[in-house]
Image: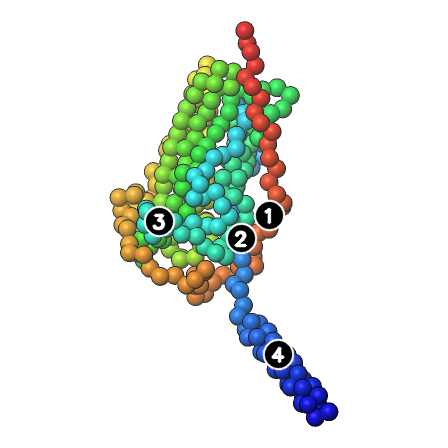
Amino acid sequence: MKVATGTIGIRLVTAMGCIALLASLTIMSGCRTTPPRRYFTLSYPINRDNATLSRPPLHSIQLRVKPFSVGLPYDRPQIVYRQSPFEFQYYAYQLWAAKPQKMLRELVLSHLEASRLAGDVTQEYGERYPDYELSAEVLAVEEYDSGPVWYGHLEMRFQLVRFRDKIVLWTYHFDRKRKVYEKQPVYVVRALSQILAEEMEHITAELDRVISTDRNVPVTLNVPRPSGDADETPDTVKIAPAQPKPEGERTYPGAPNWDELLIVPDGPPVELPPEPEQPDEG
């Protein structure tokens, strides 16, 4: 009986010790909180004035905006930041609300629709084939850190193709950096959006010029190419030594209300059907 009683006592002590250990581990784990994930979107106000929306389109054509391609380092939800041309780094908790190439395509589509450049601006094939197709490649969409200075860096290449014979009528490339005066990712995203907004004014005018020439009609729009900021040129961006970052996240004093910036994606992306084969005109 003494032996049995002692065995039971040892088991009770061991069980109570395990419970206390689990409780202490639970309390300790509760003290360490994971930083919240913050989602950002590329966006800028698009001019939808009544005069433009009420007038006929500049060209009675159908323009299809194809899915944009993107370099592999940017084809992911994490926002890229770089301190060197030779190394990519990724925020762990600062994320895109959708992949950047999809957001850029949506912005380009909305801008062209609001400009009334074409009678029909679409993403998919409709009852008939489009007259022209606009494609783009996203070569860089990132935060670039140059010592104490941050930049928003956006580089894209556009191409306009006449659909019936697949002739390339126009190509356009821009590579711009804009200085960010507040070292927070939200201001980098705003700088990227501003670059695209300025470039789209010129791109829309260029598309009008090229389509007008192809259709032998007068040109309507005339917007000069953006000159950019004086400190945007790549030659002025120096490579700084890599600085250590806190694991997974960077924190900033005086951060804005991030809840107002949170954007939840509507759902999984919808895959477009494959392009139809070129109709035989013979």
* Tag 3 near tag 2, CB within 8 Å: no
Q: Residue at x 39, y 61 (%)?
A: 245
Disc 1 to disc 2, how far (Cα)? 9 Å
- Of labels 2 and 4, earlier in sequence is 4
SS for tag 2? strand
Left or right side of 98 for 248: left
Disc 3 to disc 4, how far (Cα)? 47 Å
Amino acid bearing label 1: Pro
Amino acid bearing label 4: Cys
Q: Residue at x 54, y 6 (%)?
A: 282
Q: Which residue is mark 2?
A: 39
- Of labels 1 and 2, earlier in sequence is 2
Amino acid bearing label 3: Glu
SS for tag 3? strand
SS for tag 4? helix
* Tag 1 near tag 2, CB within 8 Å: yes
Disc 3 to disc 1, how far (Cα)? 29 Å
The x and y percentages for residue 211 are 47, 21
Disc 3 to disc 2, how far (Cα)? 23 Å
- Of labels 3 and 2, earlier in sequence is 2
The x and y percentages for residue 269 are 60, 40
Residue 18: give its label. Answer: 4
The mark lying in front, picked from 2 and 4, is: 4
The mark lying in front, picked from 3 and 1, is: 3
Disc 4 to disc 1, how far (Cα)? 43 Å
Q: Which residue is mark 3?
A: 87
